[in-house]
Image (spheres, rainbow, N blue to C red):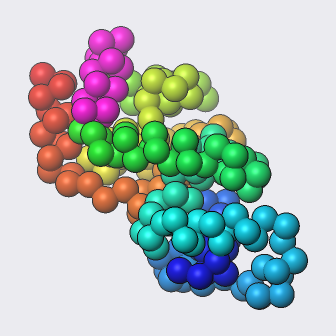
Amino acid sequence: MTPFEVYKTYLALKNHFTQANYDYHKYCGKVRATLNSFYKRKDRFWFEKLSRQKSEKQIIDFFVSNFVSSGDPQSLWIGDIIRDGEKTYNSWNKKNESLTYFFKSEVESVIDIKQFDEIFQVHGTSHPLLLKEHLQGNLSLETMVILDKILGYKVDFDKKLKDPVWQLVSQNMNKYSSFLNIDVFKFRKILKESVV
């Protein structure tokens, strides 16, 4: 990839994670960016460095990991990615390489607190235990997405929870889901073993 293509990938993924109506996969990562705007940036040399160090897939994963790891992708500044991006990318990579282990341990830790069905119950406007555990950092976004792919609980949460906290988590789950390719049957089996 050229430095300009890396920059366009960054813009496309930023749009994907921050704008409700932009889908990276649907638009094939296309954005309106000009070489002129790229050369005006003071950080263009960083994009050049990335283009030399990483393959196309690694660059996409690098940006995805940074946007996903940010609690609010909208407020993620490019300076943060330049400064801490590599560390974030490495820990995200490590987690994805052993995703079955992380999923199993996170689900089991939540099940130890309550019965499995109780963690999905929404009472009035209060957050369900599943969301509380995610907000406390006990359940990763990956686990939330995997549980939704298995159980489809998000539709119910979207209907019942109208607060901005859930809406942000829901949007992050929607946006991340297309980048998280998992074997649903394998994770369903892990979940059954953990619940029993």
Q: Residue at x 40, y 47 (%)?
A: 93
Instruction: Name the outermost residue toward the top.
Output: 113
Count the numbered circles shown.
0
Verify whether residue 127 appears in magenta: no
- Left or right of 117? Residue 144 is right
- Quarter occupied by residue 115: top left
Main SS, magenta residues: helix
What x and y, as percent, mark residue 111?
Answer: 30, 18
Q: Residue at x 25, y 33 (%)?
A: 101
- Left or right of 155? Residue 69 is right
- Quarter occupied by residue 195: top left
Q: Choose between 110 and 55: the one closer to the eye.
A: 55
Q: Is residue 64 above or below residue 161?
A: below
Is residue 163 visible in the rendered image? The answer is yes
Q: Choose between 165 and 139: the one closer to the eye.
A: 139
In magenta, the rendered stretch is 101-115
Q: Residue at x 44, y 50 (%)?
A: 155
Q: Residue at x 85, y 67 (%)?
A: 42
- Left or right of 115? Residue 187 is left
